[in-house]
Image: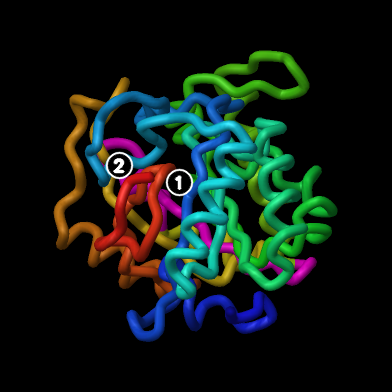
């Protein structure tokens, strides 16, 4: 099994800039609770097998089930070298994430670990991420503009207080940038996933690319809106719109172009994986 000391961009299917020698990954759906409500997200669990809807899983696993399933999948496939938690809620807002990954790390010293997060709780969990040797973190951040953020996010919870509007937006952005800086400074590779919402943040993505690059992120993943929940009536961007934005943003940060907008309960390589 490959070790996590290998530069993860070479093999991680969600970070590598080519499609050669990719590792398989498993997304463990152990995190149902979210601390931030995005207007485009109706995260949750259910019976759907739609494989392209992010923030969704067909079930929520307990740590016991998740660890057992990970062991089973690794035995089946020696190319499964990445264990990740991406939801269906916010991984860092759920104690089950910590329990699950700590137990897997004790079993597999050389497995690569990955986490997807909205970034709000990232800075206060850097020590834990380092302790269990998480090598890659994806931060969902779609604007650095307070006005835009107040449209994208409906509410956020900070230390058990529910916050809305511009105050909420400012706190989210501040926390995201702080988290990216701290993770990058500790040697964790940070990719930023940015949802392109034509009616909302079309003018924000390129300035955001500059901001996250300065904060230490090494990769940006600009993906189209999946119209859902409060944004179900909005349109997804065209292929050309995405290409144009990526080209402009690439002046500040490398662009990832292979995203399949994975759900939170899959195993394999994106595009040819299966639901757990």
Q: Is residue 161 left or right of residue 117?
A: right
Residue closest to the eye, 37 or 86: 86
What residue lies at 65% left-to-right and 79% top-to-bottom? 3
Image position, residue 261 (x, y; %): 33, 51
What residue lies at 63% left-to-right and 37% top-to-bottom? 64
Where is mark 2, residue-wise? 197
Question: Which quadrant is the N terminus positioned in?
Answer: bottom right
Q: Secondary structure at mark 1?
A: loop
Residue closest to the eye, 96 or 230: 96
Q: Is residue 121 left or right of residue 68?
A: right
Q: Is residue 211 visible?
A: no
Where is mark 1, residue-wise? 142
**Counting other residues with Cα less than 10 Å from the Cα at mark 1, is it few (<14), some (14-19), or many (20 or more)?**
many
Image position, residue 269 (x, y; %): 35, 65
Q: Are marks 1 and 2 in contact (CB under 8 Å)?
A: yes
What residue lies at 78% left-to-right and 46% top-to-bottom? 125
The region drawn magenta spans: 185-205
Q: Is residue 108 left or right of residue 232?
A: right
Image position, residue 227 (x, y; %): 24, 33
Q: Quadrant of residue 225?
A: top left
Q: Secondary structure at mark 2?
A: loop
Q: Is residue 230 above or below residue 30?
A: above
* Of pointers 1 and 2, the one earlier in the residue sequence: 1
**Counting other residues with Cα less than 10 Å from the Cα at mark 2, is it few (<14), some (14-19), or many (20 or more)?**
many
């Amino acid at each position: 099994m490959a070790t996590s000391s290998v530069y993860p961009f070479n093999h991680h299917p969600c970070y590598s800039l080519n499609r050669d020698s990719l590792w398989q990954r498993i997304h463990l759906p152990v995190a149902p609770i979210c601390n931030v409500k995005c207007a485009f997200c109706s995260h949750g669990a259910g019976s759907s097998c739609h494989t392209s809807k992010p923030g969704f899983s067909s079930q929520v696993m307990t740590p016991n089930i998740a660890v057992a399933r990970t062991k089973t999948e690794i035995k089946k496939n020696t190319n499964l070298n990445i264990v990740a938690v991406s939801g269906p809620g916010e991984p860092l807002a759920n104690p089950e994430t910590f329990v699950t990954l700590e137990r897997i790390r004790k079993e597999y010293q050389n497995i690569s670990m990955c986490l997807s997060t909205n970034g709000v709780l990232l800075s206060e969990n850097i020590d834990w991420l380092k302790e269990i040797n998480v090598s890659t973190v994806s931060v969902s951040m779609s604007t650095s503009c307070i006005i835009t953020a107040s449209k994208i996010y409906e509410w956020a919870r900070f230390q058990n207080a529910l916050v809305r509007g511009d105050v909420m937006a400012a706190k989210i952005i501040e926390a995201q940038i702080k988290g990216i800086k701290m993770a990058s400074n500790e040697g964790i590779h940070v990719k930023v996933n940015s949802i392109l919402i034509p009616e909302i943040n079309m003018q924000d993505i390129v300035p955001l690319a500059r901001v996250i690059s300065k904060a230490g992120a090494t990769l940006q993943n600009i993906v189209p809106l999946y119209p859902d929940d409060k944004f179900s009536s909005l349109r997804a961007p065209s292929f050309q719109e995405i290409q144009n934005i990526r080209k402009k943003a690439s002046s500040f940060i490398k662009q990832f172009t292979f995203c399949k907008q994975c759900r939170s309960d899959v195993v394999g390589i994106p595009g040819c994986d299966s639901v757990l």
